[in-house]
Amino acid sequence: MVYLDHAYDGANIAWDDRSVRSPRVIFGQISYLPGGFVGPRIQRDYELIVLHSGSCEVRIDGNPGRSLDPGLAYLFRPGHREHFLYDDRGQSNHAWCSVSPGFLPDALRLGLDTVQEGAGFPPSECFKRIVSAAFLFRSGQSASALQVVDTLGLALFAEFVHMVHHAAEPFRDDSVIRAKHYMEDHLRDPDCLVQAMAVAGCSKSALTYKFANELGTSPSRYLWRIRTEKGLELLADTGLSVAEIADRCGFQSPFHFSRCVRLMQGLPPREIRRRAWAKEPVCEPCMPSRANALYP
């Protein structure tokens, strides 16, 4: 991994030494004096940048420049030629986190690749706390500390995808949004559906009608679908047992989870995991009419 090559590509740089790195993840902060710049350079990593103050114009692959708005998080992907031009009138400050492409799980990389090019997103409180936690460490610390830095790097990019998903929320009905977000955050809770209705502030029949109108499904079916999708993610990205995954995702039993996975993907959980770990393709999800059979 390349440490952004600021020392080679930038002008009038005032370094802020608050940086930490592992072989796969870097968190850093830097300040540029008026007229500072970086590049042109080829981006080798997935990188998140938050401009705290000042201004910055970014030119990608020779295209016309676009401005970064202070306070928003931006994603930069590997393989592009970048040129950053900072404020001519005053100092600019930004923080970043970069992760080697090969270190990102496939599901997370796919999520990042769907983010709209050039779009900025307000950092969530979780995003800010992950960054703050990373700066508690320093480069050169123990192997266990650097493993924590690796974990925080992956967590930051996962939270960014979560932020983008919520920022791009297409639903107009606030009660649907509240119920949907509650379900996503409380999959393990056996009373998740009841509590989601309470959070939405409407009756079961009213919420069922709104879900059908906005999502084309019922609240119950939506909940079991996202529980199954989360279970599939854990099968691919962790070594948790089927029973542990079933419990974490709110299934009634390991058998119930296995049945839902079979109906959605046509394969048992252990085969899903084997193919994911062997980088083999998993079959396409089943048709909605068949998938609906697993949801009450």
Image: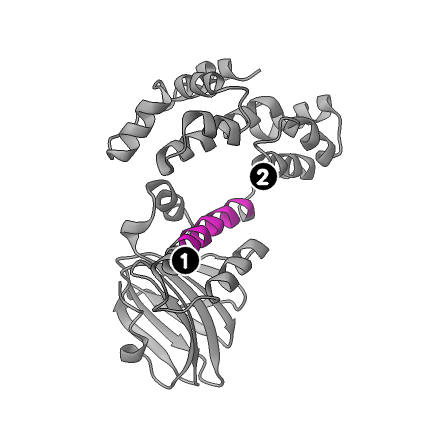
Along the viewing direction, whichever of 26 and 201 lies nearer the viewer: 26
Q: Are the residues tagged 2 and 1 within 8 Å (C-beta)?
A: no
Determine the residue positioned at 26% across, 58% down.
79
Residue 213 quadrant: top right
Along the viewing direction, whichever of 224 and 78 lies nearer the viewer: 224
Residue 153 quadrant: bottom left
Alpha-carbon distance for marks 2 and 1? 24 Å
Q: Is residue 267 magenta?
A: no
The amino acid type of the residue labelled 1 equals Leu
Quick check: 168 above or below 4? Answer: above
Secondary structure of the residue carrying numbered label 2 = helix
Report the mark closest to the observer, 2 or 1: 2
Q: Give me the disc on residue 185.
A: 2
Image location of residue 112, percent across then percent down: 39, 48
Along the viewing direction, whichever of 231 and 86 lies nearer the viewer: 231
The quarter of the rendered structure image containing the C terminus is top right
Q: Give me the disc on residue 115.
A: none
Image location of residue 36, percent across then percent down: 38, 81
Q: Is residue 218 visible?
A: no
Q: Give me the disc on residue 75.
A: 1
Determine the residue positioned at 50% across, 26% down.
225
Quick check: 125 above or below 188? Answer: below
Quick check: 90 above or below 240? Answer: below
- In the shown orientation, is residue 177 left or right of residue 257? right
Q: Is residue 157 magenta?
A: yes
Magenta-highlighted residues: 151-166
Residue 139 quadrant: bottom left
Quick check: 103 above or below 199? Answer: below
Secondary structure of the residue carrying numbered label 1 = strand
